[in-house]
Image (tube, grey):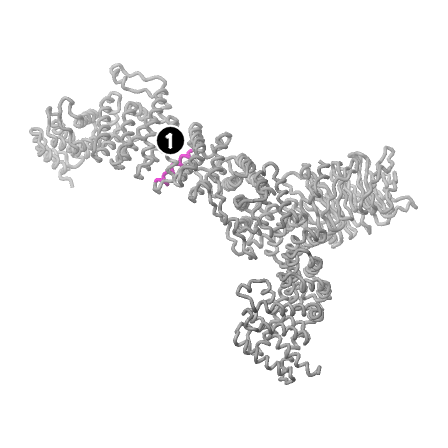
Amino acid sequence: MAVFDTPQAAFGALRPVCVQLTRAQTVENVRQLQAHLAGVSGAALQELQEYVLFPLRFALRVPGPKQERLVQSLVQCISSVLAATCVKKQELLQELFSELCTCLAPPPSSVKAAPLSEELKLAVIQALHTLMHSAYGDVILSLYRPSSLPLLGFAVSLLLTLAEQEKAKQIKISALECLQVLVLQCDCQEHRQLDEDEEQQCGDLFASFLPGISITLSRVIAGDIKQGHKPTVSAIRLFYLIVGLVMADKQLARIPKSKEKLPVEHSRISELMIHRGSDWTKSTAEKLSLLLHKVVESSSVHPHWKVRLELVELVHHLLRNCSQSLVDSFSHLLKAVVGLVNDENSEVQSRCNKVLQGIAEQRIVAQNRALADVLSENLHSLATALPRLMNSQDDMGKVSTLSLLLGYLKLLGPKINIVLNSVSHLQRLSKALVQVLELDVTDVKIVEARRSEPPGPLQQGVQKGRCQKKYFRFFTEEKVFQLLQQVCRVLGYYGNLYLLVDHFMGLYSESGLYRKQAAMILNELVMGAAGVGVDFLQEREVPLNVDDLKGSITSILDEYMDQANWYLVTSVDTEESSPEQSEQHLGLAVRAGGASSSILLQSSEPPVTTRTMNSNIWQICIQLEGVGCFAAVLGKEFRLLLLSALYPVLEKAGDRTLLISETALGTLADICEACGYDSVQCLINENSDYLVNSISLNLRQLAYQPRASQVLDTMLRNSDASLLPLIEDVIQDVLSALDQSYNSQASTFLRVLHSVMTALVQWFGMPSAEEHQQRHSDKGQSRARSQGQHKVTMTSQEVEQFFLDYVSQKRIAEGDLPDLEEEEADEIPLAKPEPSSDTEGEAPMPSHAQLARDVMERCIHLLSDGSLRVRLKVLDVLELCVTMLHPHGNHLLPMAHRVWPALVTRLISDDPLAVLRAFKVLCTLAQTCGDFLRQRFSKDVLSKLTSSLLSQAPASARAGPVYSHTLAFKLQLALLQGLGSLCERLDMGESDLNKVADACLIYLSAKQPVKLQEAAQRLCQVDQSLFEKLSVLAPVLL
Amino acid sequence: MLTVLMALPPPDPQFVLRGTSAPVHTLHFSCGGPEPDIPLLFSGSENGFIHVWNLKTHRVDTALDGHGRKSVYCVETMGGKDRLLSQGRDQRICLWDLAEGRTSVTDSVFTEHMGFCRCSLLKVAQGRWLMAMAARSLEEVQILELPSKTSVCTLKPEVGAKLGMPMCLKLWQLSCGSQPVLLAGYEDGSVVLWNVSMGKALSQLSCHQEPVMSLDFDSEKAKGISGSSEKVLSIWCLNEQQNLQVYKTHELVNAGISDITIRPDKKILATAGWDHRIRIFSWKKLKPLAVLDYHTATVHCVSFSDHSSPWDRLLAAGSKDQRISVWSIYAQT
C-alpha cells in the first residue's frame, strides 16, 4: 500500500525531510524520514537510494561525539533503506560497510567514555546484516578482494569481540549470525552460489581470520552454560562453516606450491595474506584438532539437545569437506557422533544415525585409508580399555562405552577386516567381549529346577525358541546385552567369517572359562554373517556365500556336539544312571576331551560343585540356542544337518534339568520353523529314520550312552504308530543286548522297555484296554445303581447301607432268600463277549503284540532281580505288557503261566513296595485271565494277602495321623481297594470271599484311618454282590 | 592305521540305512562323480525293489520296481549313475535309464537261469561292455556284448567235468584291449579260468569242498580269493603259464561266506559272513584286521565305494535283517 509509486512522487515527499535532516541531525528528523520512507515503494526508493542515504551518512560522519540515540536511529534508518533496496555500487558498499563498522568500534582508548549501549550495538549489527543482504552478488565480491582484507578483518574482530564478551544473548547471537553472513555462509537461500575460483579466493582470504575466529568461537562454545543454547549453537555452526571452508580438501588440493605474488602496491596486504600450503595446513590442522577436542568435550555433554544436534552437524560437515585435512581430529569427532547414537533425545539419535549412514554410504571410511586407521586405532584403544571399563563402569556407562564400540565397528564396515587381520586387535577385542560376557553361575536354582514328571507331549509349551534370560557377572541391564549382541553380529556381518569362527573356536577350546562366552559369540557371529537382526549402516561389499556359512556352521556344530562339550555333568542324580555308569561315562568324556578338557577333569572329580553344574547347564543351553540360530540361518538347508544334529537336541529335550529341556524344546521349535515342519511331531516323524539310526547306534553302547533311551522315549512320546516299523529292529536290538547283560545293564534297558511299552499301549493297546475297563466299570456301576448307591464317598449313607445289607446277608446265610434272579439275568449276557477276543489270537500276531510278548519274556527273567528298583520297574513294564496282550488271550495265557511263579514270590514275600506293584499287575492280569488265575490266586496268594491285612489291622488302628504316609498304609489301602474287583473278576469261591470279608471287616472299625474305612466299605459293597450271587447258587449246592 | 583299528573297541557303523523292508542282496556305490553329483548307493532286495539311496540325506531317492517283485541279487552301473544293470530272480537282466529322473527299463535279457549266480560286467570300449552270465543249461556260462546283446560265446565245460552250476563269475582283462578272461566258481568247489575269445578253459583249480559262493580277483598281483559255505577262505594265484594254483588258505571261525570284495586300492578285503559279521583282512597277508559286528542275520553282500577322495570312501554291507550298514574304514584311524 505504497503511497508514492513513482520516483518523482517519492522524491517530492522525501526531499523536505532529507533537507531537514541535513540541516539538523536530530532523532526527531531521522524519525520523520523513517516515517516517510514507509510510504515509498521499493522501486521508487531504489532510484532515490543514494539521495536518501546521503543525509543519514552525513549525519554519521559529522565529527565529534554524538548522541547515542541519534546514532542508533540513523543506523536503524539506514538499515530500513537497505532492507528495501539493493546496493549496486562497489564504492557505496565499501563505504557503508566501513561507516557501520566504525559505529561499532569502541571509542579510541584515550577517551574514557561509557561503552556503547546494547541497543546501538544490536542496531549496527543488524544494519551490517542487512547491508550484506542488500548487496548484489558481484558487488559483494568486491569486499572480498585482498585489498579489503584490513576492512574485513576489522569487522570480523569487532563482531567476534561482541560475540565473546557481550552479556546480552541477542547481541551474541546477532553478532555470530552476522559473522556467518560475512564469511559468505549465510543460511538463507538468496545468495548467489560462488564458483570454484571465487570460493578458493574467499578461502585464501578467510584463512587469515581462521585462528582468531576458531579460538574465539571455541571459547564461546565452551563458555558458561548460562548463556543459553542459542549462542552456542550459532557458534558451533559458524565454527564448522568457516573451518569447513578454509580447510576444505577440495580447495587445499588446488593450492599452488608457492605463494602468489601480489602487485607491488599491495605488498603490505600481501604480508597479511596466508598461503595455505601443506605446512600451513598441517600446523593449522594440529591446532584445530586441539580446539575441536575442546569443542567436542564441552558440547557432547551439553544439557541442551540442540547443541548436541549441532555437534553432529559439525562432524557431518567436517567429515564431508575436510576428511583429509583434518584426519587427526576425527578420532574425537567420530567418537562424539558414535557416542551420540544413543542420545536420550530421539532427534539427535536419528540425525546421528543418518549422518553415520551417510558416512557409510558415501564410503568415506572405505575410501579413506587414513580414516580407517583412525577408527581402528580408536577401536583398539577402546578394546584395550573395555574390560577395565566393564569392571568399573555402571550399566549406563557400559551402555555408552559399548555404543561407542558398536559405532566404530559399524563405521568401519567392510574395513573391519583390516582390524581383524591384525592379531593384536582381534585378540584384544575378543578378550574384551569374552570377559564382559562372563555369566553369573552362582544361582543354585538353575541346578535345582527339574523337569516335572512325566513330561507332557512336546507340542505343549513349545513356543518359538526364545533365548533363555541369562545373568551376567558384570552387568544386569538388558540393553548392555543387546549392544554386545549387535557388536558380535556386526562383526559377523562384515568380518571374515572363517577367521572369526576359527578364532573364537580357538577360545572355545582354549579354556573352560571362555567356553560359554565364546559359544555365545559364535552364535551371534553366525546370525550376523547371515544378516539376521543386524543393524548395519552400509551393505557389505561381498554378498554372503552360503557354502561358506554352511561350512562354518557344520564345524561349529561338530564342536558343540562333541562328547566333551555336549555331555557335561549337570546333576548329581544317581537315579539317571547308576554311579559306576556315570563314572564310566565321565571317564569317557574326559578321554574324548583330551588336553583341552581340564575343566571337565575337575568336574569329574567327586565333589561336583553347584557352580560347575550351573556353568555346564548354561554351556549346554547356549549351545542349544546356537543350534536354533544355525537352523534359523540356514532355513531348509538345515535339513541336511538334521542327520547329525536332531538326535543330540532331542536328547537334551529329555534332560531332567528344567532349563536344558526348555531350551532344547525351544531349539526344536526353531528347527521346525526353519526347516518348514508344522510341528515338533512332524519334525520327529519325518526324520525318524535319522533318529532311529542314532538311537540304534547309541543303544549299542547303552552303558555309556544312557541318554539314547531318553531320546527313544521322547521320540516315542511324540510320534505315532507309523513309527513302529522303523523302530522294530531297534527294539529287537535292545532285547538282544539285554539278553547279553542281564546283570549289569538291566535297569538302563528296562527304562527303554518301559517307554517302548508305554508307547505301544498308547498306540495300539488303549482301545481294547479301555473296552475292558469300560465293561468292568459298567458291571460295577450297574450293580451300584441297582443298589441305589454311587461310588462317590458318602460315608454315612454307605455305612447305613452296609448295615442294611449286612443284615440281609445274614438272612441269606440263614437261608432266607430274597428274589435275585433279575440280577443274574443281567450278568450272563455281559460275560458272553469274552470268548470273542480269544479267537483273534489264532490270526498271525501283529508286530506290536509280538514285541509285547518278547518284552514280557524278558520281564519273567528280571522279576527276581536282586535290586528292588529293577523289580519295581519290571513290574511296571509287565503291567503294560499284559495290557498290550489283552486282545491276544492265546498268547497271554501261556505267558501268564510262566510269569505266575515269579509274580507270586513278589506278592507274598517281597518289599511292600514290590507287593503293591505286583498287586496292580495282578489286577490287570485278572481282567482277561480270570479262569486261569482263580485257582492259583486262591491257592498261592489270597490267604497271604488277607492275613497280612489282618495282621496289619491292629497297627493301623493304633496309628496316629502320620501313618497315612507310610508304606504299610498304602499297601493296606491298595489291597482293600483292589481285592474287591479282583475277587469279582476272578469269580472267587465262597471260602475265599469269606477270607476277604473277614479281613475287610476289621477295617470298618471306627478306630481305623478314615481312608481305610472307606476302602473297606467299598470292598464290602462288592463283596455283598458276590455274596448275593453265591446265595443264588446256594440252594443248588445245598 | 590298521593296527590301530585292531586295538580300538569294536567300531560302530557310520550309519545304517533302513527301509528296504526286505533282506538286502546286493549293493553298488556310485560316488565317483564330481562335486554337484550326489553320491548314491544302489541296493537290490528280496522284494524285487532296487533302492537308490542318497548318501547325503541317507534317504531313498527312488525305488525301482522292474523284477516283478522277485529278489534282485545283482546291481551294477554302466559307465555312470544314469545307466544301471540289474539281475533278478525273475530270470531277467534289466538295463535301466535313470538320466534326468527317468526310471525306465530300456532293455532286458532273459537269462533262463534258475540259480543265484550274479552276472559279471566288463567295459571293453567306450559304450561297449561284455557281460558274463550263467546260462539256461546247467553248467554253461554265456558271454554277451552289451548293449547290442549279441552273444560272443558260450563257455561249456568238457563233457564229464561235473562242475555243476556256475555260482559266481568275474570277468576281467589284464589291461585295456587285452584278452578278456573269465573266472568262474562252480558248484563243486572249483574255480575255472576261461579264455573268452577262444571259449576254452585254461585252467581249473579245486578250491573248496562246497560250492564257491563268491570270488574276487586282483589282476595286478594275479591273485584271487574265494569263499564257500565252509570255514575256509581260499587264496589262489595265476602263474605265467595261465595256471591256477593254490596260494594259501585261511581258516575262519564260523562257516559260510556269502560275498567277498577286494577294495579297489587292493589293500584290504571284506567278507560277508553267515555268522552276521563282516570281516576285514589285509589283502597282502590276509591278516585279520577287524570284525564288524552289527547285523543280526546273515550278511549277504559287501561293497566298497568309489569316492574319488580316499577319506570319503565307505564300506556297505547288506543283510538279511533288512538293514544296510555303512562303515567308514578309513576314518577309523
Query: Looking at this view, is A904 or B83 the one in front?
Result: A904
Question: Few, some or many C-alpha atoms within 10 Å of disc 1 (few <14, some 14-19, many ≥20)?
Answer: many
Query: Looking at this view, is A809 or A875 the one in front?
Result: A809
Residue A90 at x, y percent in the picture: 21, 25
Q: With A371 as the anchor, is A159 left or right in this view?
A: left
Dominant secondary structure of the residues highlighted in magenta in the image: helix
Is residue B59 visible in the rendered structure shown here? no
Residue B166 at x, y percent in the picture: 84, 46
Query: Looking at this view, is B147 or A438 the one in front?
Result: A438
Q: Which residue is mark 1?
A: A332
Residue A483 at x, y percent in the picture: 44, 41
Amino acid type for the residue under numbered disc 1: His
Quadrant housing residue A993 = bottom right
Can you name the residue that lies furthest to the right here? B160
Quadrant location of the N terminus of chain A in the rendered image: top left
Q: With A143 as the anchor, is A314 left or right in this view?
A: right
* Magenta stretch in the rendered image: A348-362
Quadrant housing residue A390 = top left
Quadrant location of the C terminus of chain A in the rendered image: bottom right
Can you name the residue that lies furthest to the top here? A264
Q: Chain of mark 1?
A: A
Residue A810 at x, y percent in the picture: 62, 81
Q: With A729 as the anchor, is A227 left or right in this view?
A: left
Q: With B17 as the anchor, is A959 left or right in this view?
A: left
Membership of A521 in magenta stretch: no
